[in-house]
Amino acid sequence: MPVSRNAGRREGRQVRFFSVVFFTLPFLLFSPAVAVSLTSAEQAPDLLRQASVLFEEGNTDQAIGKIRDSIRQDPASAEAYDKLGEMLIAKGRFDEALESFHAALNIMPSLRTARTGLGFALLAKGETDTAEAALKYALKLNPYPSMTHYALGLVYEKKGEYEKAVAQYKEAVKTCKRGKK
């Protein structure tokens, strides 16, 4: 079957295109710029661990710096935003904590610790009704709810609903004794 001149040209262009891709792709994949971005993404979990250690040691300002570095390396880490929110609450920076918990929940809506942290931050701002709603939702997600029960007890205590508060505190103790923190 005869081949048209256009078909031959097309085949030639396709061969040249695939040759260029075949020979340049390895250089693109292993270029320093790509290697740096891979290394950066791989550094994020280590930075998160370092931040957690610093926070546990009481170096909250340094921990916040490390966790922000981790977030810059991996902005899709719900865990990093959650941990940052916890640190910001410890510093009394409740509006920033709320932003951080919302960022975590935008990435992972069912992150129970972020829901509980959201409730704590709202409570600290005096938004008891919103805190109550956030914490009740956290209870639905949370297989280890002692901290959430405790936070809900704080909400009820602040609202003057002492019987509900005591019931939540008792539930917190009960679940904690069962090892469900």
Image (cartoon, rainbow, N blue to C red):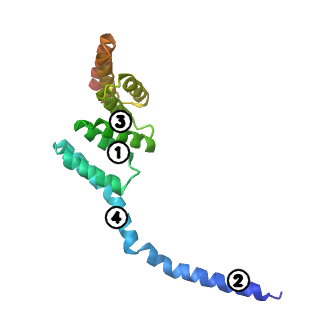
Give the total number of marks visible in the rendering: 4
Q: Which residue is mark 4?
A: 39
Q: Is residue 111 above or below residue 66?
A: above
- Residue 22 lies left or right of residue 123; in this view the side is right
Q: Earlier in the sequence, mark 4 or mark 2?
A: 2
Residue 43 x/y as whole percent: 31, 59
Label 2 environment density (alpha carbons within 10 Å; few <14, some 14–19, many ≥20): few
Q: Which quadrant holds the N terminus?
A: bottom right
Task: Give the CA distance from mark 4 to mark 2.
Answer: 40 Å
Q: Amino acid at mark 3?
A: Thr
- State the residue in front, 70 or 127: 127
Report the residue at 24% width, 51% height from top: 65
Q: Which residue is mark 2?
A: 10
Q: Earlier in the sequence, mark 1 or mark 3?
A: 1
Q: Is residue 27 above or below residue 120?
A: below
* Residue contact between numbered discs 1 and 3, judged by CB atoms under 8 Å: no
Spot the residue most to the top.
Answer: 163
- Residue 17 lies left or right of residue 176; in this view the side is right
Q: Which residue is mark 1?
A: 81
Within the image, what quadrant is residue 42 found in? bottom left
Q: Amino acid at mark 1?
A: Tyr
Disc 4 is placed on an element classified as helix
Label 4 environment density (alpha carbons within 10 Å; few <14, some 14–19, many ≥20): few
Task: Give the CA distance from mark 1 to mark 2.
Answer: 52 Å
Q: Amino acid at mark 4?
A: Thr
Residue 122 x/y as whole percent: 34, 29
* Residue contact between numbered discs 4 and 3, judged by CB atoms under 8 Å: no
Residue 111 x/y as whole percent: 40, 38
Task: Give the CA distance from mark 4 to mark 3.
Answer: 28 Å
Given this view, does label 1 or label 3 mark the residue nearer the observer? 1
Q: Which residue is mark 3?
A: 113
